[in-house]
Image (cartoon, rainbow, N blue to C red):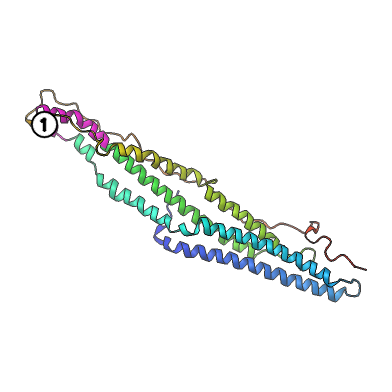
Amino acid sequence: MSTPDFSSWSSMPSRLSAAWNSLETAKNTAHDRDRAEMEAVMAKLEEEYDDLFTTSTDEENAVWDRFDEIKGQMDDAWTALRTYWDDHFSADVPNAKLVYEAARTWKEDVFAGLGDHENVIAQSPARMKWTGPGAEAYAEKLPDQVQAMADLKGHVQTVAVGAEQGAMVLAGIYTAVLTEVEGLAETVDALPGDDSGATFANRIYNVRFFLEDYLETLQKYHSGDGVWDAPAEDAKTAMGDSVPQADVLSTPNWPVASSESMQDMEPGTPTAPPAPITPPVPEQPPVTPTGPDTTDSAPPTPVDRSNQDRTDTSDVGDEGND
């Protein structure tokens, strides 16, 4: 998973807003084109076939009523899609960068601040230069402290990586939405009409289904049912497992040496030198981010209505013909 360019993330809300506005404009333009096309067809029919057919005002109104019904279905689909975006996504666009910055703090400040203390202590000759009960208690507990420090660093690193992965998932979703909405706007704008009169409202008929299909896509993004589910769940699980384990390593549970007095020691070489401490390995290794198996999303394909029965206009405009 490539890291998004968070340095320019502040522009993402406005870019997304512009994409949605473009889609709305394309939707409205599709309606305007279909209506103008239909008006031209109706005028042509009236001009060329007036002597052959008699069409009542009621029949003409029925045609336009059906046209407006299809437009209403398109508008309802748009309202449902845009409302879902506004309710579940729009306000959280800036949060992707906030999560990423939190991850950087964990990596660059918290984790880096822990330094290499576990290895420094493990390799320190200090425990070889003191004798007495206090020195023995210190030497006995030191391996546990070294391991605890290593484990703590492992947990901190896991949280940092998990937060970073969460940020990339959020950014990936919003970037995908931007690309998809921009592409959908272009597809809608390029929809063909039909000036022959064989079908009508061809653009808005298709736009309705495009919008309904994309609502399903947003719902999958929101529910986690899709390519972003696995990396998001990995991050959530890693952090969920690490935080409680790290709590165990905090005071008062940190391993301490037990002796009546840690002052009960003096310089000297221990009678039985402590065994070397092996450089520790964290019990909870950090999770490596894995990206989703993404594929380029193809633009929607318009419905070919040229061979369809005119179910949208059945029994409209046929009555009263001589």
Can residue 203 be seen? Answer: no
Specify whether 262 is left or right of 206: left
Say above or below: 286 vs 206. above
Secondary structure mostly seen in magenta is: helix
Rendering coords of residue 33 (x, y %): 69, 70
> Which residue is under mark 1?
261
Q: In this figure, what is the number of numbered marks?
A: 1
Specify whether 134 is left or right of 68: left
Residue at screen point 62% across, 66% down:
26
Q: Residues within 10 Å of mark 1 (few under 14, many from 20)?
A: few
- Image quadrant in which you'd find residue 209: bottom right
Q: Is residue 292 magenta?
A: no
Residue type at mark 1 is Ser
Residue at screen point 56% across, 57% down:
84
Q: Magenta stretch?
A: 124-148
Say above or below: 28 vs 253. below
Q: Is residue 128 magenta?
A: yes
Residue closer to the observer: 199 or 258: 258
Rendering coords of residue 264 (x, y %): 8, 30
